[in-house]
Amino acid sequence: MNTSSYIYGESFYHKYDIRAKLFFTFLYSILVFFVRSWYGLIAFPLIPFAVFLVSLGGIETWRAIKRILPVIILLFLFLPLQDRGGNPIVEINGFVFVTGEGLYRVCRLASRFIALSLILMLLIETERSENIIRGLRFYRMPYNVALLFSMILRFIPYLGSMFDEIRASMSLRLTEGKRGFPIMPSITAFAVASVRMIPDTAAALEERGFGRKERRDYKGLKTSPKLFTELFFSAILPIIFFIVMR
């Protein structure tokens, strides 16, 4: 929690103004819930994926996909339970496994989940946490809310990486010839490690001024013509893309 998820880079998205980046993230996250067509469901996750690939490279993009891959797999595993009364696509001995309505519902959920996950991970991995707070403060968000929002964005990926380390450690303890990892011991170790993080989290919040009356000035962001240009493109490009693909 005391280390940032920021990954240094010189890409165009790294250099993008945080205020325009926050506006783009917020607008894109809203528009993804109004997409209905199959073209939109496929295309909307591809935009943050492409920006992720260009800005952070193939290795970091694959790491981001690995974080959300288990949830996507679970969504499609429970596909037979979605809208069993719809038009059947896969049916064996009278049991309907896949329906058209169920497939559409799962693909819509998966599209939203992938797009939101990638766009948020793109934000926290291409921008320092203090700049995120400055950007949120620019939009008149209260300091405590902006600080907690920034900490949450860092907390979620940190928990994911910690669970991967615990799972790998537990797998090494299995007897030779077995695969996988013990689920309950891993979850127990994860819960204990999370509780032990509370003092570090509290210290990180206190260090950043949470609860203090005197705080660092986060309103010192400069305004330039470049900002207005980036805000314009952050607004117009998602809207045009939504109109075409919805």
Image (cartoon, rainbow, N blue to C red):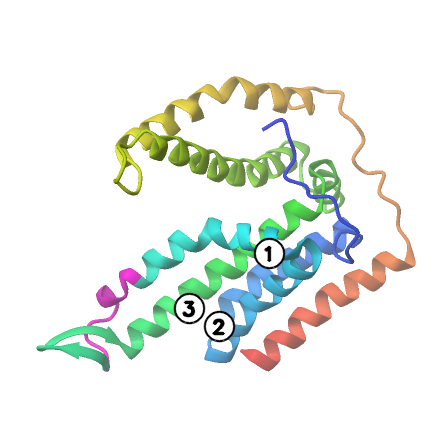
Task: Give the extent of the magenta segment.
Answer: 77-87
Q: Quadrant of residue 137?
A: top right
Tell me the kind of residue under disc 2: Leu
Q: Is residue 67 depicted above or below 208 in this figure?
A: below
CB of mark 1 within 8 Å of CB of mark 2?
no
**Can you tell which quarter of the image residue 194 is in?**
top left
Please identify the quarter of the rendering in which residue 211 is found. Answer: top right
Q: Nearer the viewer, residue 233 or 196?
A: 196
Decide: is 98 above or below 10. below
Labels 3 and 1: the sequence-earlier one: 3
In this view, the residue in front, 174 or 200, is: 174
Q: Which mark is residue 41?
A: 2
* Residue type, numbered disc 3: Arg
| Residue at which label 3 appears | 108
How far from the left and from the top, in percent, is residue 152? 55, 37
Q: Which mark is residue 24?
A: none
Q: Which residue is mark 1?
A: 119
User: Which secondary structure dominates the residues rendered in magenta?
Assistant: loop
